[in-house]
Image: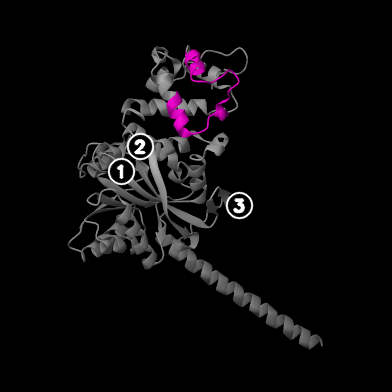
Amino acid sequence: MQLNALCSFHSSFRRVILQSRVLSVARFTCLRHLKTNISDKGICYSILDAGVAETVMKLVWENQINKSSTLIISNQGKNPHITNAALKVGFPDIILTEKNSDVLKGHLKIAQKFPACRVKGRVLNLFDWTFTNLLTEENLQQEMNTLGQFEQNPWSDDPPLTVFGIVTPGTVVGQNLFKYLTNQLVTFGSLYTKGSVDWFLFINPMNYQALVKGKLQHHFKTYRPQPIMVNILYDWKVLLKLPAVSFWPPLYDVKFKKEEVKYGSTVIRKNEIYLVQFTPKASLFQEHLLEVRDINACFMFLEQLLANKSRRLIPRIEQMVPGSGIELIKMGYTMVTLVADLKSPEEMVHLFKAIRNLPEFQASPLETLVLHGKEEYPQAEDGVLEGH
């Protein structure tokens, strides 16, 4: 019996060793493949299946506003499926941006098989334009060289640029997607110097949840300024949902704790990634929404107002624009109305426009903040009006 037990133990031990070796080989293979998508600036996520990539590019083609616009494909990594799909679908003008010059050369070789398409390449991380240090001469020159090849269109025309990208989780842009979208549009920076931009971005469940919350009225207490501003400035829609394992490396959102959450008929799942189209609203610069000069002021207004949603509305706005309280009372607000009682982004815009048109807005602390980035609020006596 001891011999049988010893043989059984030896057999089990060998199985454990073999399984461990198999796992080690698999782990090594996984890391080796992962390394091919890692550049000096992080991981590039790729779509694994060629058929899925073609479906994605067909959706971009069918939904883009301007069929003759330039398509910019941002950092797809070594996997060529998106490049192939875009060429097969028939985009007439394509610019490939990659952080790795060797990877970019590989994609450009593929493009040579499609002479009908105009394809250019740039060694560039598209999403670095807002968040990296553009004060260096090298980065500024790189941006100028890239933007110089695009034609400038009036804002009344169709978007001259269509951008496709996978927003990498854990990066600065991944964590601040809405700040990226609003800041570029508000400041008319980077791509927006050439006109409107049609974005097609794969985003994670966390960002999608914030986007949905920024649109639904009954979630106003959980609003943050950035999602509100995106809903004010952009029309957006979900075009496709893909499992996280459709990408390499898998695009799991580790910060999204629940398996799924529901907001009305909208279901957001932990293991899904969402292709969302963001387009600046056609009515953005018409008189009934916002004028160009007011976009940044509106954003500052929202950021200040929503810093504490439990505050009373009239005293808080009086702090930003002294003398505005009477106008707010005429609009139907009372001294017990809280910031959290506001019901929608549209109401926020209506409120801002009413304040913006008052004579008291001139030289107010809010205007000082807009012009100089510095707050000059009076000190509060009751603890309600304290500045930040």
Q: Indicate which disc, 3 or 2, sits on the residue closer to the N terminus.
A: 2
Q: Amino acid at mark 3?
A: Lys
- Depicted 305 relative to depicted 188: above or below: above
Q: Which residue is mark 2?
A: 184
Q: Does the magenta-highlighted stretch encompass residue 347?
A: yes
Amino acid bearing label 2: Gln
> Residue, x 47% and y 55% (percent of image)?
273
Residue at the left extreme? 115
- Name which residue lies at 60% across and 77% down: 18
Between 297 and 174, the one lying in front of the other is: 297
Q: Are marks 2 and 1 in contact (CB under 8 Å)?
A: yes
Q: Which residue is mark 1?
A: 197
Callout 1: few (<14), some (14-19), or many (20+) C-alpha neighbours within 10 Å? many
- Tell me the kind of residue under disc 1: Val
Q: Nearer the viewer, mark 2 or mark 1?
A: 1
Secondary structure of residue under mark 1 = strand
Label annotation for residue 25: none
Percent of width and height locating residue 164:
34, 52
Q: Is residue 274 left or right of residue 386?
A: left
Q: Nearer the viewer, residue 26 or 253?
A: 253
Give the extent of the magenta segment: 324-351
Q: Which residue is mark 3?
A: 258
Residue 132 visible in image: no
User: Would you place residue 243 above or below residue 364 in this image?
Assistant: below
SS at badge 3: loop
Q: CA distance from mark 2 to mark 1?
A: 10 Å
Could you say where residue 245 lies in the image, as x and y percent from the top left? 49, 62
Crowd band around label 3 with a 10 angstrom C-alpha radius: few (<14), some (14–19), many (20+): few
The answer to whether residue 148 shows anywhere in this view is yes
